[in-house]
Amino acid sequence: MSIKDDLMNALKENEESRFNDRDSRPMVEVWPDDEFALWVSRHTDGVRHIICNTPEFMDTPFCGVGYH
C-alpha cells in the first residue's frame, strides 16, 4: 500500500466520528473575557487606526465605517 492509500483508509475509518464531532461543536470562535482584549490588540493594525481617525480618510472604503 502507498502512503496515499493508508491516509485515505485512515480518514474513511473515522469519518463518521469526525462528522459527529463537527456537528456538536459551536461554529463560532469563543474567547474568554480576559483574553478578548489581548486577541483584539493582536489583530488590530495601529496604522489603520491612525489613518481612519483623520477627517480626510474617515469615510473611505479602507476604513470600513462611514458612508460610501
Image (cartoon, rainbow, N blue to C red):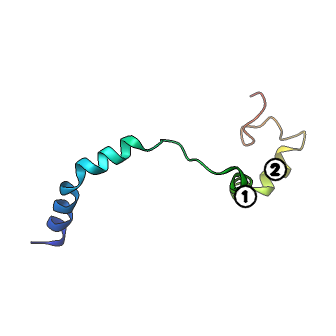
Amino acid at the residue labelled 1:
Leu
Quadrant in which residue 65 is drawn:
top right
Q: Does 45 appear above or below 60?
A: below
Toward the left, the furthest residue is 1
Which residue occupies the foreground of this view, 4 or 31?
31
* Structural distance between the alpha carbons of marks 2 and 1: 16 Å
The mark nearer the N terminus, 2 or 1, is: 1
State the image coordinates of residue 62 (x, y, percent, origin top left). Answer: 72, 43
State the image coordinates of residue 33 (x, y, percent, origin top left). Answer: 70, 49
How packed is label 2: few (under 14 Cα within 10 Å), some, or many (20 or more)?
few
Q: What residue is rendered at 75% in x and 41% in y?
A: 63
Left or right: residue 13 compared with residue 60: left
Left or right: residue 68 compared with residue 1: right
State the image coordinates of residue 4 (x, y, percent, origin top left). Answer: 18, 67
Toward the bottom, the furthest residue is 2
Which residue occupies the foreground of this view, 45 or 35?
35
The secondary element bearing badge 2 is classed as helix
Q: Which residue is mark 2?
A: 49
- Quadrant where the N terminus lies? bottom left
Marks 2 and 1 close (CB-CB < 8 Å): no
Q: Which residue is mark 1?
A: 38
Q: How many marks?
A: 2
Quadrant in which residue 8 is drawn:
bottom left
Amino acid at the residue labelled 2:
His
